[in-house]
Each structure stands twice: as C-alpha cells, then as structure tokens.
Amino acid sequence: MFSTNLSFLIFVLQDIFLVFGTLIISYIIYFYISYFTRLNPLPGPLPLPIVGNSLAYSGDAGKLAQELREKYGDIYEIYLGSTRTVWLNRADMADKIMSANNRTSENFNLDEIGVSDKGFLFNRNLNDVIFHRKIFDKTIMTSQFGKKFVTITQSLFKELESLWKDNGCLEGDKEIDFILWMERFGFECILKLTTNFRAYALINYYNLLNYKQKVKVPESSLSSIDTEGFTKSLHAYFHILHHFFFSVKCLLRAPGKRKTTNYFLRNKDSLDSNIMNIIKLQKSQIENSSTDEPPENQDLLTQLLMSDVKDVNVRQNLVEILNVLQQIQEELVNVIGTNEVSEITLEDLNKLKYCKAVLTEGTDLHKFFEFP
C-alpha cells in the first residue's frame, strides 16, 4: 500500500514538473519570438526572460549608460523586466520625442514611491510639468535669484572654511572628505534659498567629527530636525529612484531584495515627512507675516510654495582632463583674481564663459521612455 502511494506521488510530481517545465520553455520561446520580430528594432544587449537586462545594472546608471553608448551608439534599447525602453544619448534629439504622448511611460514601481505625478523627470502629466516650468521661469531663472544664490553661497563657504580651519584641515596633511562636506553644504544652500531657514548642517557635522570640542549650534526653527539623517536621506534618494526604476515589479519584494526595498521606502517616508514639516512651518510664517515684502527679498519657497523641485545630477567628467582643468583655472584667475577673500559678483560669474561651457558639457541627460 505504501509503495503504491509513493509511486502515485512520484508520478504526480513528475507531471507537475513536466507542466511547469513546458510552461517555462513555452514562455522562453514566446519571449524570444516576440523579441526578434519586434517593430522598429534597435541595437542593444540581448535580454533574458522576466528580468530583461536588469542584471547588467550594478547601481551606477551613468556608468551603465556610458558602457552601452560606447558599444551600441547614441541610441539603443534595453529591457527593464519585460518592458522595452530606449535610451537616447543626444540632447538635440530629445525635443523630437518628448511629446505629450510618449514623454514617460507607465511604471508601477515609480507609482509606488509617488514620483510619477510630481516634479519633472518622471511626471506623466504634461500639463503639470508645463505649470511647474512656468513657475521656475518666474523664480529660479530671474536675476534676483542669481544674486541671492551668489550671496548665500559665499556666506556659507566662509562658514565652511572657518570650520575647516578650526578642525585643522587647512594645515598639515589632515584629509578632508570633500564629498561629505559638500553634501551638507549643498543641503544648507538649498534650504536657505528655498525657505530662508538654517539647519546648521555644517556645524552639526563638525560637532560629529569633533565631539570633544563642539561648536555651539545657534537656535533655529528647524532645531528639532536631525540634519545628519536628513542629508543622508537626500543622498539616498537617488539610490531609491535607481532601485525602483531598474527593478522588475514581480521581483521587487523577492527574497534578497525585500529588505532593501522596505529600507528605501522607510527612508523616503522619513524624507517626505521632514520636507512637509518644513513646508508647513514656512507656510505658517508666510500667513502670519507682512505681505508688503518685495519679491526680491523673499525666499524661493515663498514664491513657489508647494512646488516640487528636483535636483540635477551633474557629472564633471571633463574636469578630469588636465588641459580643461588648466583652462578653468586660468579663466578663474583672469576674471576673479588671486585674492582669496574678495567678493564674487554676479557680473564675474557672467564672464566665466569657459566654465559655463564645461558645466554644460559635463551635464548628462538621462531620459527613459517606452518605445513600441
């Protein structure tokens, strides 16, 4: 009796494996038939069923795009899961394809983290994008913003330089982790420009490094915010976008990825909560303040309250070239001079033609869209 039941169980398991094997082989055949008979084929790496080319992504989208560009040219296709996407590496062709119909394709993962209906990069609502663009033209693109940006940047850099001197970074061989300092510096610049608040992230980071000789942190409306956690959340935001954009929907919470996905979601919720608290605080101050203040004296958030601002990722690869760096240094000396304590004016910045060209060339355009 036992032998009969065992034989029957083995027979059933064989049938189950046979059915699953047949389905898998059938799907693989169907996938590659669809791939090789697709409309408007473009060069690109051969995808795998279900995962597509996601395994080629190591966490650096810029590096992946550069490698594929060197191999396949300015325009190529890859598969994110079963979704075909075209990567375009020429800015002069972007205007021809970024229309209302194909600007950004649907993406469940981006919907889950709430970026497909906000901002610019992944927003599928073209009217909303146009609206935000008009607001930006009235604020960030104005001369008042440029003057304020120069003033705030110089003031914060003097504070940064003072902290470096106190820490002994400008003397001897003590190393400066420039990236970590610049993350706090950028955070302070953006916060001051957009809200006129100070979180004193530079001082807090200095105190973190020198816990025995801490600097007193001035009182601020944002004293309750953990600036270190905030800056780390901002830094992780780009990793969050990459993780969700390049992940296959069915594998997003698979073993091995579930922990990372949940961590990124908690990180984003914390970031959203901090940003909303700042906006609410600023909104209450605007409602209780005088409305007679001229626009040029207002902070950016007062001018575009509740608007969504996205950062731009700039990779200055050209600066690594020695002759380019030398020309940049020569232009800075010719325009600004060698006096380290002299004030930089907006007129000086307008004269830096070569520096502006290098920044323009060093800015990568990454635009992803679905192609039938």
Image (spheres, grey):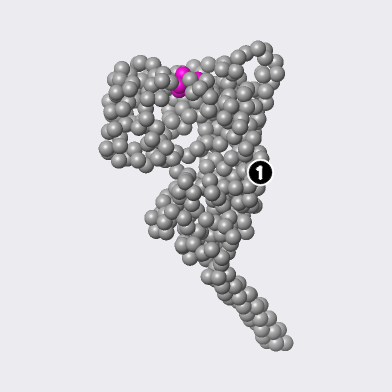
Three-letter code, disc 1: Asn
The answer to whether residue 194 is above or below residue 364 is: above
Q: Residue at x 28, y 28 (%)?
A: 330
The residue under label 1 is: 125
**Lateral position of residue 35 relative to residue 162, left or right:** right
Q: Secondary structure at mark 1?
A: loop
For residue 36, say whether it is visible. Answer: yes
The percent coordinates of residue 297 (x first, y second) are: 57, 16
Prevailing SS of the magenta stretch: helix
Q: Quadrant of the C terminus?
A: bottom right
Q: Quadrant of the N terminus?
A: bottom right
Along the viewing direction, whichever of 355 and 7 lies nearer the viewer: 355
Residues shaded magenta: 148-153
Quarter of the figure with residue 165? top left
Q: Residue at x 37, y 27 (%)?
A: 352
Q: Residue at x 58, y 21 (%)?
A: 299
For residue 152, say whether it is visible. Answer: no
The answer to whether residue 98 is above or below residue 172 is: below
Q: Residue at x 53, y 70 (%)?
A: 36
The percent coordinates of residue 239 (x first, y second) are: 52, 44
Quarter of the figure with residue 360? top left
The percent coordinates of residue 41 (x first, y second) are: 51, 64
The answer to whether residue 275 is above or below residue 218 is: below
Along the viewing direction, whichever of 203 and 358 lies nearer the viewer: 358
The percent coordinates of residue 257 (x first, y second) are: 57, 54
Q: Residues within 10 Å of mark 1 (few under 14, many from 20)?
A: some
